[in-house]
Image: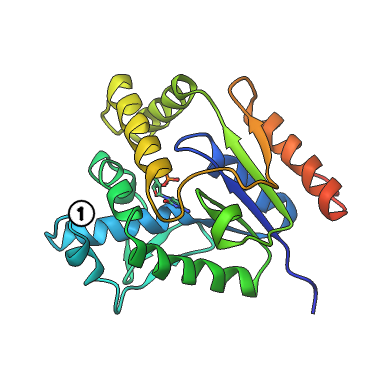
Amino acid sequence: MEKRIAIAIDGPAAAGKSTVAKRVAQVLNFTYVDTGAMYRAFTYAVIQKGLDPKDEEQAVSLIPGLSIDLAENGHVYLNSQDVTDVIRTPLVSGNVSYIAAMKPVRLALVEMQRAIAEKKSVVMDGRDIGTYVLPNAEVKIFQIASVETRAIRRYEENLEKGLKTTLKEVEEDLRKRDYIDSHREFSPLKPAPDSVLLDTSYMSVLEVVEAILKIIKEKTGIEILCH
Ligand code: DC
């Protein structure tokens, strides 16, 4: 059997990880795994059941029997319900960091993430992929950008999706999430010591993809034909 390869792309919210990771996965013909979507789907499950996303006992009660599927076409399913769009709404974005700080939730989702990477070569994006989920990943990228750049990117994405938010609201949400994500006790957002730091504040998507492919080629020797 061919050796499976793992590419970890971590970094703060809205640093452009998912756009880039999806493209890199496409070029390499690897599976793209959006771990943030899993935390978002869990958060939606809690909200949908009328539970309090800040109450660990209530949230954790949903773990048994929970099924989250990331389909190859990019759709996200929660117990067979298509939640692709609803998990991007401000209600979910504003609560997901509380859920992601709960250790039992993380342990359950990390188990699913590792199971995917055991079966396939992956490009996995998140916050703790290089540090905790896949510490032996062949390539680890820590992608950053200034909070102002990230807020504009996310605001424009929201506009395209028809989501009504102001730039100020988006920036406040990012600052709040960055703070909670990097200060939580278990598995906080931080670069792995062996990761490559990539500041994308002044780079286009294409430039970031090219830079990451170059790093992958150098570190793994994979032949990247055309993209
Ligand atoms: O990447 P995103 O914005 O969709 O992630 C949503 C939230 O999930 C984010 O605020 C932090 C959390 N998250 C995490 O804690 N660990 C991951 N591996 C991925 C996301």
Where's residue 8, x and y in %? Answer: 63, 52
Where's residue 164, x and y in %? Answer: 26, 29
Residue lying at 41% horizontally and 54% vertically, measured from the top left: 37
| Residue located beneath label 1 in the image | 53
Q: Is residue 121 visible to the viewer in this orientation of the structure?
A: yes
Instruction: Pick the quarter of the image with the N terminus.
Output: bottom right
| Left or right relative to 47: residue 114 | right
Q: Nearer the viewer, residue 182 or 120?
A: 182
Residue lying at 55% horizontally and 74% vertically, measured from the top left: 115
Tell me where residue 168 sits by quadrant: top left
| Left or right relative to 188: residue 162 | left
Q: Note whether 119 is above or below 133 in the view shown.
A: below
Instruction: Pick the quarter of the image with the C terminus.
Output: top right
**Outermost residue toward the front in this view:** 185
Where's residue 201, x and y in %? Answer: 58, 22
| Left or right relative to 201: residue 44 | left
Q: Nearer the viewer, residue 122 or 160?
A: 122
| Left or right relative to 170: residue 22 | right
Tell me where residue 124 sits by quadrant: bottom right
Q: Note whether 204 is above or below 31 in the view shown.
A: above
Residue lying at 44% horizontally and 19% vertically, measured from the top left: 148
Q: Note whether 157 is above or below 220 in the view shown.
A: above
